[in-house]
Image (spheres, helix red, strand yellow):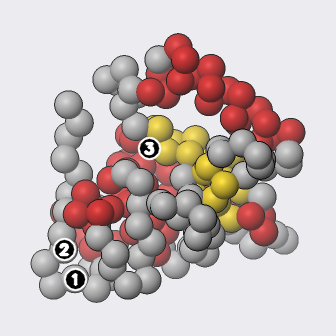
Amino acid sequence: MTKRLRLADLPASIRSRLPHDKPPSVAKVARSRIPGLPPAESPLVARLLLVIRADGLPEPSRHAGSALGELVFAPPRRWRFDLAWPERMLAVEVDGGVWSGGRHTRGAGFIADCEKLNTATLLGWRVLRFPGPHVKDGTAAKMLRQALAPAC
């Protein structure tokens, strides 16, 4: 069973910049259509999207053809990235359930992820993978700031 994520778990510096009097849970944000905040597949992706917005980082592209707004790549395959910046050929995959035997850590899921991410690399994409703890502890945001920094 996964732990429920709450916006209250975010640092105060980020919460203070959010447009809510009483912020909803991250899971509720993930299911809702708050203006300017794209829908998200999971509470972890929703949490990372909130941090991206609060830090003033460039917004990831959202794909209208996907129900969740994920960017589809490598047609005719239906592979999608959780978040992507196509102009920079940068993508993010958020992997939940790493300690509970989730899809990304079981044999078939791991093998499928290898095929997807290796294909993305061959197509020129840089793919950052973040497990839940990295989203929660700020490691993902720190690495994204580095990856999205303007080129010198």
For label 2, count other residues whose C-alpha is less than 10 Å away and answer few (under 14), some (14-19) or many (20+). some
- Please indicate whether residue 70 sits to the left or right of residue 79 in the image: left
Look at 29% across and 70% down and name the residue there: 32
Measured from the top left, where is residue 107 in percent x and y?
Answer: 53, 14
| Residue 138: image location, x then y, percent | 42, 53
Say what amino acid the circle numbered 2 marks.
Pro
Badge 1 vs badge 2, beta-carbon distance below 8 Å: yes
- What kind of element bears circle 2? loop
Kindly report the distance in space between the C-alpha atoms of the residues bearing marks 2 and 3.
22 Å
Depth check, front residue: 128 or 33: 33
Image position of 111 with respect to 75: above or below: above
- Which residue carries the number 1 mark? 20
Instruction: Give the mark, 2 or 3, whose residue is nearer the N terminus.
Output: 2
Q: Position of residue 41 (x, y in %)?
A: 41, 54
Q: Which numbered tag is attached to residue 134? A: 3
State the residue at coordinates (55%, 17%): 108
Q: Residue 142, can we see it?
A: no
Q: Which residue is mark 2?
A: 23
Task: Give the residue displayed 18% in from the left and 69% down from the top.
Answer: 24
**For discs 1 and 3, the disc positioned in front in the rendered view:** 1
